[in-house]
C-alpha cells in the first residue's frame, strides 16, 4: 500500500536554530501534502496545504515565515521551522494524497516527527 | 469552530467488550473518516464513509453516519488489548477544498 515517510522521527535543536522535516511519498505521486501539528493528548491542527510546484496555503494563525514549506517534487515536501523556540516543540505530521486529489481519496499519513527545542 | 467533537474523551473497557465512540460536527460534509493513532505515532486510516452512505463495515469496525444529526459513530466489536489507541474522526467539509478537520479524539483503553 501507499506509504508516507517522515524524517527525522525525532529531533532536538537549540533555540534560535532552524530544523527541517521531510515528508516523502514512497510509492506514489502526491500533488498535495498537508502538514499538521499536534500537542500532547490533543487533536491534529492543520498548518498548511503544500502543493507541488506552487506556494503553500497556510491556515489562519500560522506564520508562513516561521514555518517554511517547500514542495519541489511530486514525492517530497519539507517543513522548515525557522528560529525555533521552545513553544515550537510539538509533534508534526504530514499526509499525502494520490495525484488527482479529490474528496474521498484516501489520505496517507507519515509517522510524525517529534521536535524538541531546548 | 467546525471541528468535530468526539465523545467520550476517554473510554476504558475490558477485552472482548464492544467500544462505541461518537463524533459530531457542525456543517455539511463530503465525507467523514475515522483514524487511529497509537501514542506518539502517525495516523492509520480506518474507514471512510461518504455523505450519502449510512453505514459501513470493515472487519470488526462498524461506522454509521447520520447527516440529519450531523453525527457519526465508530463501533469496535470484540475489542482486543491491541485496539488501545486514540481514535479521531475527520471531516471533509463542503467548501473546505478537501481539507480534513479533525475532532478531539477518544482515548480507548482495552484492559486485558
Image: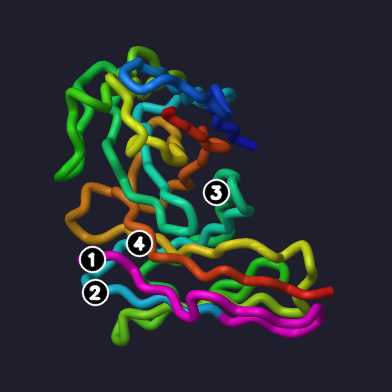
Mark 4 or mark 2: whose residue is earlier in sequence:
2
Q: Secondary structure at mark 3?
A: strand
Q: Position of residue A53 (x, y in %)?
A: 26, 16
Cα separation between marks 4 and 2: 10 Å
Which residue matches tag 2? B26
Q: Pinpoint residue A44: horizontal percent, then vertical percent.
A: 39, 52
Can see residue B55?
A: no
Crowd around label 2: few <14 · some 14–19 · many ≥20 (10 Å): some
- For label 3, the residue is B43
Q: Position of residue B112 (x, y in %)?
A: 84, 74
Q: CA distance from mark 1 to mark 2?
A: 6 Å
User: Cβ–Cβ below 8 Å for labels 4 and 2?
Assistant: no
Left or right: residue B95 versus residue B87 is left
In-front residue for pair B109/A26:
B109
What range is drawn magenta here? B1-20
Label 4 secondary element? strand
Give the crowd class for mark 3: few <14, some 14-19, many >=20 residues within 10 Å: many
Residue denoted by label 4: B91
Contact between labelled residues 4 and 1, with CB atoms less than 8 Å apart = yes
B4 shown above or below A102: below
- Please state the chain letter of the residue tagged with numbered disc 2 in the rendered image: B
Amino acid at each position: 500500500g501507499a506509504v508516507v515517510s517522515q524524517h527525522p522521527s525525532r529531533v532536538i535543536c537549540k533555540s534560535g536554530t532552524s530544523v527541517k522535516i521531510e515528508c516523502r511519498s514512497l510509492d506514489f505521486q502526491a500533488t498535495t501534502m498537508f502538514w499538521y501539528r499536534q500537542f500532547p493528548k490533543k487533536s491534529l491542527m492543520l498548518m498548511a496545504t503544500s502543493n507541488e510546484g506552487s506556494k503553500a496555503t497556510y491556515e489562519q494563525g500560522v506564520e508562513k515565515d516561521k514555518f517554511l514549506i517547500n514542495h519541489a517534487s511530486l514525492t517530497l515536501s519539507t517543513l522548515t521551522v525557522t528560529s525555533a523556540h521552545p513553544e515550537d516543540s510539538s509533534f508534526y505530521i504530514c499526509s499525502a494524497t494520490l495525484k488527482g486529489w479529490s474528496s474521498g481519496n484516501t489520505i496517507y499519513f507519515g509517522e510524525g516527527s517529534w521536535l524538541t527545542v531546548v | 469552530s467546525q471541528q468535530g467533537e468526539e465523545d467520550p474523551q476517554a473510554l476504558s473497557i475490558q477485552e472482548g467488550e464492544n467500544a462505541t465512540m461518537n463524533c459530531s460536527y457542525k456543517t455539511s460534509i463530503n465525507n467523514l473518516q475515522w483514524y487511529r493513532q497509537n501514542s506518539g505515532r502517525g495516523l492509520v486510516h480506518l474507514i471512510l464513509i461518504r455523505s450519502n452512505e449510512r453505514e459501513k463495515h470493515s472487519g470488526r469496525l462498524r461506522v454509521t453516519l447520520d447527516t440529519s444529526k450531523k453525527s457519526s459513530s465508530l463501533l469496535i466489536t470484540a475489542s482486543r488489548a491491541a485496539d488501545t489507541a486514540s481514535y479521531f474522526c475527520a471531516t471533509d467539509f463542503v467548501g473546505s477544498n478537501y481539507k480534513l478537520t479533525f475532532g478531539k479524539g477518544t482515548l480507548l483503553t482495552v484492559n486485558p
